Image: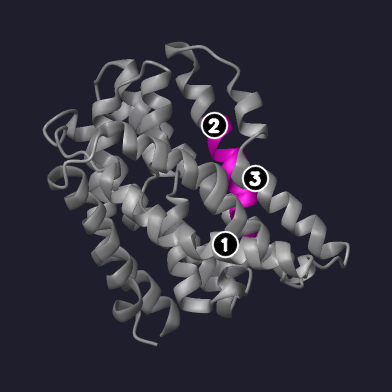
Amino acid sequence: MDIVVVILPIFALILLGWALKRWAGTAEAFWRDLERLIYYVFFPALLFHSLSHTEIDLDQAWPMLVTGILFTLIGMGLGYLSKGLFHDPPRVFAAAFQCSFRFNSYVGLAVAGALHGPAGIAAIGLLMGFLVPLANVASVWVLARHGEGNWLKETLANPLIMATAGGIAFSLAGLELHPLLDHTLELLARASLPLGLIAVGAGLKLAGLGHARGHLWYGVTVKLVVLPAIAWGIAAGFGLTGVWFETAILMAALPVSTVAYVLAVRMQADGQVIAAQVAVTTLLSMLTLPIWLGLARA
């Protein structure tokens, strides 16, 4: 399958969301409510439905999981290194730190599903179940001096984590969904990916491109170039192949999640730099993601 043919429609929906936000006359509250609906209803339905229908072999999956944890920890280390490389205020570093390891789940699920169908969604959903809490805890640890709130509780109550854990438990228990519930979840799952991608585009903000350029471009380079290369080396060392190898590379090469911006603003860090990093990594990943995935399939 041509990687470009798979990925271009995904990014076309992101650009559609960007255009709709600016020219369709929709209120800001509409986009906030849409993203909340996607986050709490549509994507959990997609993850639970996919995982509950997949026969999960943890013996086969664990090398991918270890690979993901290792390259995420290395990304955190590279992100923390920027504190000594640039002389921006601490609140800039605290926000930009997230760029080196956080990932956009919406884009990841869409690409994995396009490449491998339900098996791809199940594989990346399983990996997300381990990496989302790790990324959240690390981000909060660095951002904590700039805000307050019980973010650990929010992490544990994350709907994506809960849906992943529920789907895995359902599958391992050998249970089957009632046909009525199964069809309902399937319909919700179908709506999740296009709506999620449109919401990603609507959230892009390019106003901060001239702000804290050192931190900005360092984080972008680590996320789109350095981290996928590190993930490649680790995955090859574990002997990963097929969907496991491609999922690990995909996860490492994903653009930064808009959640990083939301978290930075809520905890009074510099939202401008991370907003620009989210936008730049999303736009540049239109080029870098097909390259990494094409190499992974070569």
Q: Which residue is mark 1?
A: 124
Up-down relation of residue 59 to residue 26 (above or below) = below
Between 85 and 224, which is closer to the camera in this rendering? 224
Q: Is residue 110 magenta?
A: no
Q: Which mark is residue 283?
A: none
Mark 1 to mark 2: distance in Å? 20 Å
Foreground of the two, 31 or 161? 31
Q: Which residue is mark 2?
A: 138
- From the viewer's perspective, is 101 left or right of 44? left
Which residue is pictured at 67% across the width and 52% down the height?
164
The amino acid type found where label 3 is placed reads Ile
Instruction: Tell whether label 1 touches label 3 (CB within 8 Å).
Output: no
Name the side, left or right, on which 212 lies relative to 140.
left
Q: Give the amino acid type for the residue marked by disc 1 in the picture.
A: Ile
What residue is disc 3 on?
A: 161
Where does the image place residue 119, in percent across and percent down from the top left?
Answer: 61, 74
Indicate which disc, 3 or 1, sits on the residue closer to the N terminus. 1
State which region is magenta.
124-138
Which of discs 1 and 2 lies nearer the camera? The answer is 1
Q: What's the CA distance linking mark 3 and mark 1?
A: 12 Å
Please provide percent x and percent y for residue 250.
Answer: 45, 64
Task: Report helix, strand or loop for mark 3.
Answer: helix
Whether residue 216 is visible, yes or no, is yes
Q: Position of residue 112 (x, y in %)?
A: 49, 69
Identify whether 159 is placed above or below 110: above
